Image (cartoon, helix red, strand yellow):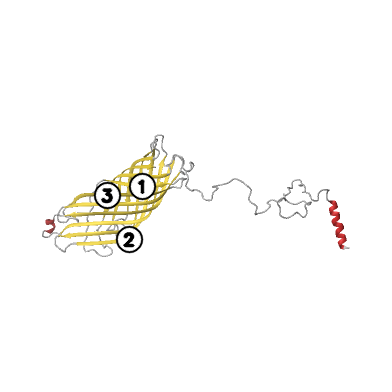
Amino acid sequence: MVRFTHILLLAALIASLPLGAMGQTPSAAPGRPVADLAGATEPNPLPGLPRPPDQPGSLLQPAPAGPVYGCPQWECPYFEKDPRLDPAELPHPGWLFDVELGIIGSHVVDRVGQFVSPPPVPVPFTVSVPMARLDWTVSPHFELGYRLPSGFGELDVAYRFLLTEGTGSTPAGSTASPDAAAALTSHLRINLGDLDYASRETSLGPNWGMKWRIGLRTADVFFDSQVDEPFAAAAANGASGFFERSISDNFWGIGPHAALELNRRRNPWGLGWVGRLDGALLFGEVRQKFAEVSTTPGGSGLFDLSNPEQAPMLSGFLGLDWRPPCRPNMDILLGFTAEYWWNVGRLSDPDLYNGRSGGEVGSYGPLLRLEYNY
């Protein structure tokens, strides 16, 4: 009885369907798309009933075609020239080489050997020799680097050195020459090397350019001074018995380095202003030697002392830059530079002027820089 009732209900449902609906694809209701079942793997059991849109059909189906962003290959070149990132007014990517020639005057703040209670061991004598006036000299600076395209910056290696000396005299009765007037000879030597990453920025506006760099610096700073009295005066009765006195100081260190360079936009003739500030903090060791040479055998004295030290340094430059319009890959810069080194002659932690051994170095003068971009 129950099965007969079910058969009657199913027959009534089939009779209510429109003619031709069975076995045919149903028409889409207004506003309701009908999925295409041609590629379906399973038959539709109720083709005459309405169904929701089959969108998306499957998460495993490929995504619809659309715009491609970025590089279509898996491996894309990172360093390609881009006119938006490498504008014509900036130096072009590639190798670069520049030479700076500074006509430098130097001086040493010298208190080396002037002890009160010197660490780490007492010195049985005091050797205090002044520095002679140092001659002006040419200090070259060489830099080789490669400028990357697409605004990725540049890698630079630089080396600079300074060598100078001076002569003079010390009067009789002074600490350096107590017996007679003596000849004075002094030397200064600086060797400096940099390994930097640099980048140019245009964030200051259309009329300004900025270049910063950061990296590692190593330096060796050496100076010495020596007085020579006449042998006969030093050996006379009542004299000191020492005819030669000398001091020397050597600092070597390595540490972080940073610099910032600003330049004003060039006029139609290629002229512009440029300024640079450069600094470093070097961690290393100071080593000092003090010597007295006696007129009698066995009476000479020599002490060699050292201790770790931190030596900050700071330099600056202000000048005029010219890029010839017919040679956009060349820069000529002329201006004035100054530099100062602290603690390169210090043997104690207190400040330089507390009566203990110490020394500082400064330099200044005009600077000419020639830069060429290959």
Question: Which secondary structure, mark 1?
Answer: strand
Question: Which secondary structure, mark 2?
Answer: strand
Residue 336 x/y as whole percent: 33, 43
What residue did someone put label 2 on?
A: 308
Label 2 crowd (10 A; few <14 / some 14-19 / many >=20)? some
Q: Amino acid at mark 1?
A: Glu
What residue did someone put label 1 on?
A: 143
- Please name which of the two marks, 3 or 1, marks the residue nearer to the observer: 1
Name the one closer to the observer, 305 or 372: 372
Q: Are marks 3 and 1 in contact (CB under 8 Å)?
A: no
Viewer can see residue 149 = yes
What residue did someone put label 3 on?
A: 163
Name the one closer to the observer, 44 or 94: 44
* Quadrant of res 318: top left
Residue 144 x/y as whole percent: 37, 47
Residue 175 x/y as whole percent: 19, 56
Looking at the image, the residue that sits furthest to the right is: 1
Q: Which numbered disc, 3 or 1, marks the residue that appears first in the sequence?
A: 1
